[in-house]
Image (cartoon, rainbow, N blue to C red):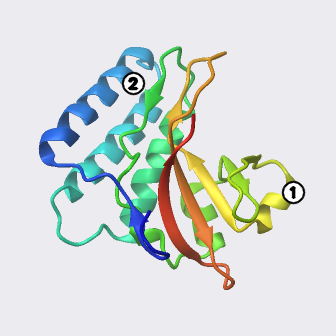
């Protein structure tokens, strides 16, 4: 992992991103044809990600909020197919410096939180999560009844209630 205030991401070239985006879009289209609003958000997120592929500057905070929010909303649509969001592992460095309130407004409620350095996930519905030093968002969906994990965006907050680090993890 890189130092505090840095984002750990997978480097994606145009050659690896496009097949991933097509695979994710195909999986979503096959399982969610009747959910046009959710599909539209997914496609908007894909477009925002694709527009920033190859850029030398990281995407703006508003772009990250819009694409990540669209991907998270699209994952809420019921499906029998497991899906990994195309937003997973993309540059989240624009979130560094954002307040807790901005994160909640831009991304919605986290999936989970952790207390201290232990990566023991606590469900967001627990009252203690609001003030927890780490919030996490799950960027995958497993089919019902299955066990496993996938890409998780971990946001670490500093003493000033602002994000000090954004890291991608893989839960199992």
In this image, 97 relative to 119: left or right?
left
**Regarding mark 1 in the picture, which secondary structure is present there?**
helix
Q: Classify 10 Å Cα crowding around label 1: few (below 14), some (14-19), many (20 and above).
A: few
Circle nearer the viewer, 1 or 2: 1
Q: Quadrant of residue 61?
A: bottom left
Q: Which mark is residue 169?
A: none
Q: Using the image as rendered, state which of residue 168 and residue 142 is in the foreground.
A: 168
Q: Using the image as rendered, state which of residue 171 and residue 152 is in the foreground.
A: 171
- Point 16% across, 49% down: residue: 13
Q: Where residue 71 sits in the image (x, y, percent)?
A: 45, 43
Q: Which mark is residue 127?
A: 1
Quadrant of image for the N terminus: bottom left
In this image, 127 relative to 137: left or right?
right
- Point 35% across, 40% down: residue: 86
Report which residue position mark 2 lands on: 28
Counting the numbered discs, the total is 2
| Precedes in sequence: disc 1 or disc 2 | 2
Q: Where residue 135 sits in the image (x, y, percent)?
A: 65, 59
Q: Where residue 108 sits in the image (x, y, percent)?
A: 62, 54
User: Can you name the residue that lies furthest to the left here?
Assistant: 15
- Point 62% across, 18% down: residue: 146
**Could you give the CA–CA distance between mark 1 and mark 2, rounded to whole angstroms?**
33 Å
Q: Is residue 21 above or below residue 7?
A: above
- Point 26% across, 34% down: residue: 20
Q: Using the image as rendered, state which of residue 86 and residue 117 is in the foreground.
A: 117
Q: Is residue 48 above or below residue 97?
A: above
In this image, 152 relative to 94: left or right?
right
**Regarding mark 2 in the picture, which secondary structure is present there?**
helix
């Amino acid at each position: 992992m890189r130092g505090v205030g840095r984002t750990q991401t997978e480097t994606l070239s145009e050659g690896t991103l496009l097949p991933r985006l097509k695979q994710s879009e195909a999986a979503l289209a096959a399982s969610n044809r009747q959910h046009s609003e959710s599909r539209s958000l997914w496609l908007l997120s894909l477009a925002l990600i694709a527009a920033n592929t190859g850029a030398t500057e990281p995407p703006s905070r508003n772009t990250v909020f819009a694409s990540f929010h669209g991907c998270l909303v699209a994952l809420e649509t019921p499906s029998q197919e497991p899906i990994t969001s195309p937003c997973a592992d993309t540059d989240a460095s624009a979130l560094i410096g954002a307040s807790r309130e901005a994160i909640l407004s831009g991304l919605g409620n986290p999936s989970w939180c952790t207390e201290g350095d232990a990566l023991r996930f606590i469900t967001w519905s627990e009252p203690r999560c609001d003030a927890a030093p780490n919030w996490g968002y799950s960027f995958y969906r497993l089919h019902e009844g299955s066990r496993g994990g996938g890409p998780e965006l971990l946001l670490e907050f500093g003493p000033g209630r602002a994000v000090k680090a954004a890291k991608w993890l893989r839960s199992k």
